[in-house]
Image (cartoon, helix red, strand yellow):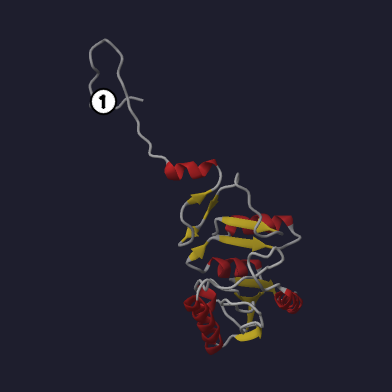
Amino acid sequence: SRVFAHRSVYDELLEKVSRRASTIKIGNPLDDDTELGPLAFEDQLNKVKSYIELGKSEGATVHYGGERPAVDLPGYFLQPTVLTDATNDMRVCREEIFGPVTAVIPFETEEEVLRQANDTEYGLAAGVWTSNLQRAMRMSRGLEAGTVWINTYRAMSPMSPRQGFKKSGVGIEHGIESMNEYTRLKSVWINTDEGPVADPFVMRG
């Protein structure tokens, strides 16, 4: 996951993201107050940790996290991790990590951030935070993602269809549109005219 922050608010946003990461409740996923549970299995934990090390070797800095937390529970837990000094061409910014890792990247212009956001093989979802309604509409049109949230994130409804773009997703989920995934169409034309059969080589509307 990537967080693009305008340079004018980059330092402030980085501080807030890191502070939030430090307060995320790590624990048993069956507890209602848990916000982050363990990774599914040891190989995935090792994979995520290897991505963090890869990011460091590429020039990124671990601003927060990146370690096993002190949790008195069995499981493959990992701290939420915030990377800085990352660029969009790094593997940690281009590949799906499937772990609690994000890179915070500064940008200058709307055109620049739109180009960087779309410079990926994936397009499941995106979020835009802005007080400018016109900018929100421009970004929602320009972002190559199946779901775009404006000033919110992870809002969902079974009535609203979801579909990933590019290499993301598995078809259409939710909404009446999802029925198309389970539908096979067939057209049957029957001539009930008792008159002579029309020339079958003439297209009729």
The residue singled out by tag 1 in the image is: 202
Q: Position of residue 111 (x, y in %)?
A: 61, 67
User: Judging from the image, what secondary structure is the residue with disc 1 in?
Assistant: loop
Q: Quadrant of residue 11?
A: bottom right
Q: Position of residue 181 (x, y in %)?
A: 44, 45
Q: Position of residue 115 (x, y in %)?
A: 56, 68
- The residue closer to the viewer here, 190 or 110, is 190
Q: Is residue 102 left or right of residue 188?
A: right
- Residue located 60% across and 44% down the image: 159
Q: Is residue 113 left or right of residue 13?
A: left
Q: Amino acid at mark 1?
A: Val
- Residue located 68% across and 68% down the image: 35
Quarter of the picture holding the C terminus: top left
- The residue closer to the viewer here, 164 or 129, is 164
Q: Quadrant of residue 15?
A: bottom right
Q: Is residue 148 above or below residue 44?
A: above
